Amino acid sequence: MSQDSDTSDTNDKHTGASTPGVMVLDDRPERAAMVEASLERAGFRVVSMLSTASGLLHQIEQHKPDVILIDLESPDRDVLESLAIANAHNPTPIVMFSGTDDQDFVSDAMRSGVTAYQSQTLTPDIVRPIIEVAVNQFRYFESMRRELRESEQRLEDQRAIERAKVLVARQLSISSEEAYARLRRISMDKNQRLADVARTALAALHIDEPEQ
């Protein structure tokens, strides 16, 4: 694949293909060619080779890689901004190699979505192991974030149910147990989540849920 080349290959997340697609951003052509060859030998699909970060966000959106591999002598804040935007919409494992070991920059890179940061030059022999480590780290942290989001959602649902139960009981002059039973009955009759029924009841009573 030539430098800055595009490919019609699509991400295996969308096609179901078993071979992960890798986007490579490397500002040294000779090294990039060796890395590309190493990736292909290791069984990866190289979906795009870039020699400059110009238009990086567009390239990520277009190719939707499974892994992004970056090796730049002096990455700038624009690169991190593009990664942060891409990561907010579609989190992806990102491995960054750089000649800088500035801790402020490293911290900013991690906050932008970089999964693994290496203050060394990328060499073909470490391509596969570093990608495998980054992907495993990414999956672990995504699992943790998903569990946190689910826990927060359960807590918000329970708060909505409790508030709706109290307000329905007050509105109809019934006990909180009877109010809860009514909410559950509506939930089953309409085949809706109890929390959604509770929020509908709160809206009908013109009551906003308190800010968390």
Image: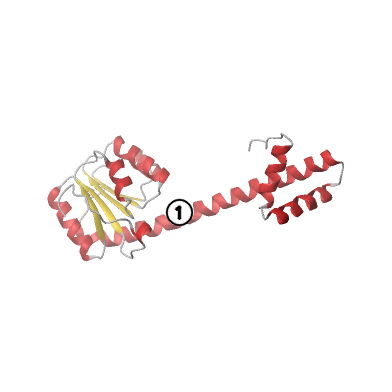
Residue 170 point in image, percent of width and height: 83, 39
What residue sits 63% from the left and 51% below the top? 154
* Viewer-proximal residue among 155 and 18: 18
Please say if 104 is above or below 31: above
Residue 82 point in image, percent of width and height: 33, 39
What amino acid is labelled 1 in the image?
Phe
The residue tagged with tag 1: helix, strand or loop?
helix
* Viewer-proximal residue among 102 and 64: 64
Please say if 204 is above or below 125: above
Q: Is residue 12 left or right of residue 194?
A: left
What residue sits 46% from the left and 54% below the top? 142
Query: Is residue 105 something that shows in the picture?
Result: no
Q: In this figure, which residue is indicated by the disc labeled 1?
A: 141
Query: Is residue 168 something that shows in the picture?
Result: yes
Check the image and name the residue furthest to the left.
Answer: 30
Residue 28 point in image, percent of width and height: 15, 47
On the image, which quarter does residue 22 sit in? bottom left
* Viewer-proximal residue among 173 and 83: 173
Residue 199 point in image, percent of width and height: 68, 43
Check the image and name the residue furthest to the front.
Answer: 190
Quarter holding the N terminus?
bottom left
Q: Is residue 205 left or right of residue 114?
A: right
What residue sits 18% from the left and 49% below the top? 5
